Image (cartoon, rainbow, N blue to C red):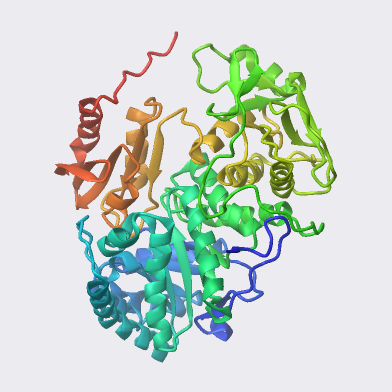
Amino acid sequence: MGYCHSPFFYERRLSREVIVGTPKQGGVVVGGDHPAVVQSMITCDTMDTAASVQQSLDLVAVGCQLVRITAPTVKDAANLKNIVAELRARGCLAPIVADIHFKPEAAMEAAKWVEKVRINPGNYADSKKFAIKEYSDAQYADELRRIEEKFAPLVKLCKELGRAMRIGTNHGSLSDRIMNRFGDTPLGMVESALEFARIARQQDFHNFVFSMKSSNPKVMIECYRLLVSRLAELGPDWNYPIHLGVTEAGEGEDGRIKSAIGIGSLLADGLGDTIRVSLTEDSPNEIAVCHDLLSQVALLANRSISLPDIKLSYDPFSFERRSTPEFELSEGTRCGGEQTIRVVVTQGTWDKVAPKIRAKDDVKPEAIYENLNVYEIDPTTDFEINCETQLVTVKDGLDLPAITAFRLLASKLKRLGLNNPILLKDCLKFPETALEPRLALLQASVVIGSLLADGIGDAVLIRGEAGGGQSLRLAYNILQAAGCRSFKTDYVACPSCGRTLFNLQTVTARIKARTEHLKGVKIAIMGCIVNGPGEMADADFGYVGGAPGKINLYVGKTPIKFNIPEAEAVDRLVDLVREHGKWVEPEVPES
């Protein structure tokens, strides 16, 4: 199964065009040879027409091409009429997308007023109860007929009115039926979407896109690769556009790094027709990151050098870390094998950060590049290695993007029957002018994160970020975001929307202030239950909006405490962490 033209040479996947709105009246075309469309979502209550209009205008002003608005009830969906009318009266022609969960009747109402409707197959016709049930083939077929009865009317209406649709599965909200048949897997996400797509095609409706979103970048990458491969298998007329996003990415550097790993890796392989960077911040901030990410990916994909066909060193549809022997990287530090992925710095960075490093610090250099016995290889030529523990890397200065060069290196090593450990670099050439920190962060995240998601890499070296301390911390943050190393508390935090039952930015900051010293603990902060319980499956603890002013607390995906007043909820979360033996007292800062 192939998911792209070549993992070594960029060629954009050719998808059919999906029309969102009327192009002559401000609509957009997704897919074909059109540039990737940038989108975001407003965060206010959909019943607040004035706020919804203003937030939409603010997004469009900074370059948002599609504006998504949640419609949790029929009443909210009906108010989209007023929002869209006011936007058009004020000269804003950007297409509006209704975000639907749980309520088919809300989707039917919303389709009357907006240019596009997003539905989630996991909860459009099912209510999630985490029930375990075995389905016979006949019972499963009955379930599909039941889904068709609920979904086909929306398809017919969208076709009649010229609307577009997104069939968007989320890792956190697969139906119990899919979970029992396929498990909580990328295959389950793909099959869930295909079930709904088949219903749309039966009605000769093709104006839709797919999405496969997860808060885990590695899972998200696997899902999209598998989806595109399955679509290619089904036939050339299944070439529907793809919307890319890492859901619940969080805020600040962490949210940008997670998004860059997931979205950037796929864009560099030629996948993706529209993108959203989901941040727990004000929505306009997402648009700037989208544009920066697209600009960097354009520089990181191999568009110039055609390479001969060579077998990949990894399975692109199932993550497995590349097997390498263990060796001593530096005095007292082992690398390769089952060891964690190590962080290497240049001598210049070491000179800047070493005086500030304490023995107990989690973020510290583990080796100096100039002191290493590392074999620098041009993977486009033949080479020989006589020692299996020899650390290797790609030679600087090659006219080849780093992602392509390291994939080629790993593949050639495998062809030679070698499994030498690999040191990853974020760049092989240095620009005359140092990259701005925000761009250096995205570039390093796309390159290093993509390769880590492929299972390649035993140590990393960040050089595109000029600041010594910043480059060191960036290396650790990329490893954490890629799920390769845990040196601090990990947060899964959704972006706000009209469904959110508390102020996500304020509460996230409050929770971080109390828990950010809990190394290795993963906490999910969810505004509502749409993706909450499912997306928290690999989190230790969850803080979820259950009702206005009320919070539910979870351990994993199991609800433990219900309807806690919001004013008490952070304290009760800390108590829950204590009860489960994960709490440690924060250090008292040295005077």
Quadrant for the C terminus in the image: top left
- Most distant residue in the bottom direction: 160
Give the residue at x 35% y 40%.
508
**Quadrant of the image occupied by residue 343:** top right
Q: Nearer the viewer, residue 198 or 12?
A: 198
How many numbered circles does the render carry?
0
- The answer, for residue 146, to whether it is visible in the render is yes
Q: Position of residue 192 (x, y in %)?
A: 37, 67
**Residue 552 visible in the picture:** no
Left or right: 383 as drawn, with respect to 115: right
Compared to residue 21, the image places residue 584 above or below, namely above
Residue at image point 43% right, 65% down: 190
State the image coordinates of residue 448 (x, y, percent, origin top left). 63, 41
Image-quadrant location for residue 567: top left
**Residue 396's spot in the image, x, y percent?**
81, 37
| Quarter the N terminus occupies | bottom right
Tell me: 499 left or right of 423. left
Q: Is 197 drawn above or below residue 172 in the view shown? A: below
- Given residues 547 and 461, the one toward you in this image is 461
Q: Residue furthest front?
A: 417
**Left or right of 399 in this view: 295:** left
> Can you give x and y, in whole percent of width and height, for residue 154 in the image?
33, 82
Q: Quadrant of residue 468?
A: top right
Q: Which residue is painted at 39% across and 85% down in the image?
A: 158
> In the drawing, does residue 224 fall left or right of residue 165?
right
